[in-house]
Image (cartoon, rainbow, N blue to C red):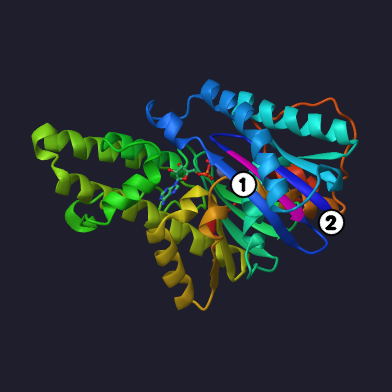
């Protein structure tokens, strides 16, 4: 089965072709809007939608050409139906339906976070089920138990800001350009994380939930305390390093607690913040010590892409939990709970990590 994947939920247009029989990604293309949004210090939804309109079809032509494949060979179209920016989702969803209707092919709407959750399966050394997934993106921070395709149990999540959002907002406070996460991580390399002490929110809460808004406020206080004159390059780098260390320590501690709670020994990290090298090395070291295994998707699959959407579509159809539809009327789901995907088994578990 040849699956076309289209991703357009935020500021990246992604298109990919996945061959489910050969279990192989044939080609993929990505256009990032980062340069366009940079001038505004964040994503401007209307500009994002307009750019997706211009990029999607040329990207599709490029991907088909690279895979040496004709449109007529496509079996099914997978597209990101939500969650995300409504206008941006409408573009990808509309184009997906246009292609499907023109070719007489069925479609499947994909939950963006399911794409992230399953993206490590694109790697050459994919994790077997079951595993715990740490999903850390610009909009979400969740720990999930993943027993199979569509079988997701929420163990804990952020009560306020997502990890990527905390990186982005803190970066802004430090005068760094959008997107803040990678810029802050780069600045942190020349900083001393021990130069100041920042809180580790909810580290000892006894649950697997997170909270990052207090950390951002602590950074604001540290910045204000130094004043304009005291905030030289070294001070900014120190704050960046201390912030990164605090967030990484909480993510590592909660991930270890989730493994202990579930009795599983495999952790999969997905989402844009999974590209953070400090998080990768800290998690890798902590799990290796316990003889547990940490799986990271390749960097290109950490951030938004079309390949994870094509893969999620292929896996949902193969596993039989969903059928592709030839109903060409469409809707988007800008807000969509991941747990609602898998039926009764996928529920939010109430976790008291102290008792596990
Ligand atoms: O998964 P993603 O590409 O988009 C969403 O679905 O949100 O994640 C984007 C987020 C942004 O907040 C970005 O700043 C963050 O991931 N990010 C990073 C790094 N690379 C991307 N955060 C920390 N360190 C990085 N190296
Ligand atoms: Zn994402």
What residue sits right under mark 1 in the picture? 29
> In x, y percent, where is residue 218?
27, 40
Residues drawn in magenta: 13-18
Q: Residue furthest top?
A: 46
> In x, y percent, where is residue 88?
61, 28
Q: Is disc 2 placed on a helix, strand or loop?
A: helix
Q: Nearer the viewer, mark 1 or mark 2?
A: 1
Tell me which residue sits at (21%, 51%) in the image: 238
Tell me which residue sits at (10%, 39%) in the image: 230
Viewer-side residue, 169 vs 23? 23
What residue sits right under mark 2 in the picture? 319
Q: Quadrant of the C terminus?
A: bottom right
Viewer-side residue, 342 vs 321? 321
Q: Quadrant of the N terminus?
A: bottom right
Name the quarter showing ligand 2.
top right
Tell me which residue sits at (48%, 71%) in the image: 287
């Amino acid at each position: 089965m040849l699956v076309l994947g289209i991703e357009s939920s935020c500021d990246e247009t992604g298109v990919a072709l996945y061959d489910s029989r050969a279990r192989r990604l044939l080609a993929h293309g990505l256009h990032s809007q980062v340069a366009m949004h940079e001038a505004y210090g964040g994503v401007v939804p209307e500009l994002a939608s307009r750019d997706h309109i211009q990029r999607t079809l040329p990207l599709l032509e490029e991907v088909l050409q690279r895979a040496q494949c004709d449109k007529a060979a496509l079996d099914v179209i997978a597209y990101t139906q939500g969650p995300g920016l409504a206008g941006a989702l409408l573009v990808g969803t509309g184009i997906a339906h246009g292609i499907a209707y023109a070719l007489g092919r069925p479609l499947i709407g994909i939950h963006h976070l399911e794409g992230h959750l399953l993206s490590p399966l694109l790697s050459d050394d994919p994790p077997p089920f079951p595993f715990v997934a740490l999903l850390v993106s610009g909009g979400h921070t969740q720990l999930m138990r993943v027993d199979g395709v569509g079988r997701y149990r929420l163990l804990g999540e952020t009560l306020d800001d997502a990890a990527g959002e905390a990186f982005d907002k803190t970066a802004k406070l430090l005068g760094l350009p959008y997107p803040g996460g990678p810029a802050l991580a780069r600045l942190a390399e020349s900083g001393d994380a021990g130069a100041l002490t920042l809180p580790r929110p909810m580290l000892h809460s006894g649950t697997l939930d997170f909270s990052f808004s207090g950390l951002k406020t602590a950074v604001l206080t540290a910045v204000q305390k130094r004043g304009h004159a005291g905030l030289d390059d070294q001070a900014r780098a120190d704050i960046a390093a201390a912030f990164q260390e605090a967030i990484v320590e909480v993510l590592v501690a909660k991930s270890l607690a989730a493994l202990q709670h579930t009795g599983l020994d495999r952790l999969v990290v997905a989402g844009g913040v999974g590209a953070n090298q400090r998080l990768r090395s800290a998690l890798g070291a902590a799990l290796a010590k316990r003889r547990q295994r940490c799986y990271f998707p390749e960097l290109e699959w950490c951030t938004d892409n079309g390949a994870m959407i094509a893969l999620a579509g292929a896996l949902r159809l193969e596993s039989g939990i969903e059928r592709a539809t030839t109903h060409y009327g469409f809707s988007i789901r800008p807000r969509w709970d991941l747990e609602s995907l898998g039926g009764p088994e996928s529920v939010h578990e109430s976790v008291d990590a102290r008792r596990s």
